[in-house]
Image: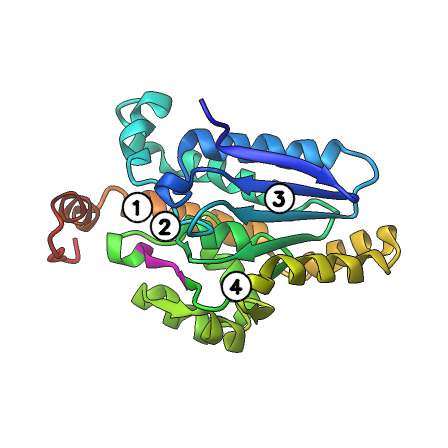
Amino acid sequence: MAELIITNIRDQVFEIVLNRPEKRNAISLDMLAELDQAVQTAARTDGLRAVLIRGEGRSFSAGIDVTMFMLLAQKYGEGWPQRMRTITHDFQSVLTRLERLELPTIALLHGHCLGLALELVLACDLRLAAEGTKLGLPETRLGIIPDVGGTTRLTRLIGPGRAKELILTGKTITADLAERWGVVNHVVPAAELAPAGEALINELKQAAPLAVGMAKRVIDGLDDLDRGLQIEAWAQSQLFQSEDFQIAVQAFMTGQKPEFKGK
């Protein structure tokens, strides 16, 4: 069975590769667990200067594998919707460990970067996107919210006005607009994405590693991330028990447009 996450170390860079291209790197429970192991390995590895995250195939990632909802009962029990604060905390912890690496983290985006995938890259320090990449947080169209740090980190990154427009509508935006809004740092032609990542890493290597790590901790410490994550978990625990969420799941499974009731 193929590894869902591949890791490589080269030139003081720890590379994490999403490796489920046949599913557009949709993130499953097993994939999330392997990602967590990769992050923890990076944290224990000496001599690194950066972490690079990318996806195999046509897209960085289409987001959460919706079949994950069906598997939550196996891990958390049949009453899993009533345990959403615990589930959300477990998911959040993976991305928080990524964010709190003292190493600078860079995400290379192409194709699609949606939902949980965008939450993943928001936990990175720097984001480069290939031209034509589509980004979005469509959770509200499923009757829920971005609860794995997406609501908190996006607001911290681009401000409440832009964050509300993206989250409340659930719409998808282009890489060019994402760059103008500050969601990504740079947009480059697809053929130049990997070289642009290498160039950025080489720039980071010019700075003292201890200073880079400390600067990152200071900047990240300016906002109350932990409180934001707690609020996300509380809100999601309410929404997963709503009638609208059940309507959205049924509509997704049948390919129909959901008719929300506000209940």
Q: Please state which of the two labelled residues, at mark 2 or mark 3, is closer to the viewer.
A: 3
Classify 174 as above or below 112.
below
Three-letter code for the amino acid on which mark 4 is drawn: Ala
Q: Mark 4 near mark 3, Cβ–Cβ under 8 Å?
A: no
In-front residue for pair 106/195: 195
Q: Amino acid at mark 1?
A: Gln
Q: Secondary structure at mark 2?
A: helix
Q: Answer with the quarter of the image where residue 138 lies.
A: bottom left
Q: Secondary structure at mark 4?
A: helix
What is the crowding at mark 1: few (fewer than 14 residues within 10 Å), some, or many (at least 20)? Answer: some
**Residue 138 painted magenta:** yes
Q: Are marks 4 and 2 in contact (CB under 8 Å)?
A: no
Q: Is residue 147 visible?
A: no
Q: Where residue 24 appears, x then y in whole percent?
A: 38, 45
Gap between marks 1 and 4 measured at Cα:
41 Å
Q: CA distance from mark 4 to mark 2?
A: 38 Å
Q: Is residue 55 above or below residue 156?
A: above
Which of disc 2 and disc 4 is earlier in sequence?
4
> Which label belongs to residue 98?
3
In the shown orientation, is residue 140 left or right of residue 224?
A: left
CA–CA distance between discs 1 and 2?
5 Å
> Badges 1 and 2: C-beta atoms under 8 Å apart?
yes
Q: Which residues are magenta?
A: 135-139
The numbered mark at residue 235 is: 2
The CA distance from mark 3 to mark 1 is 27 Å
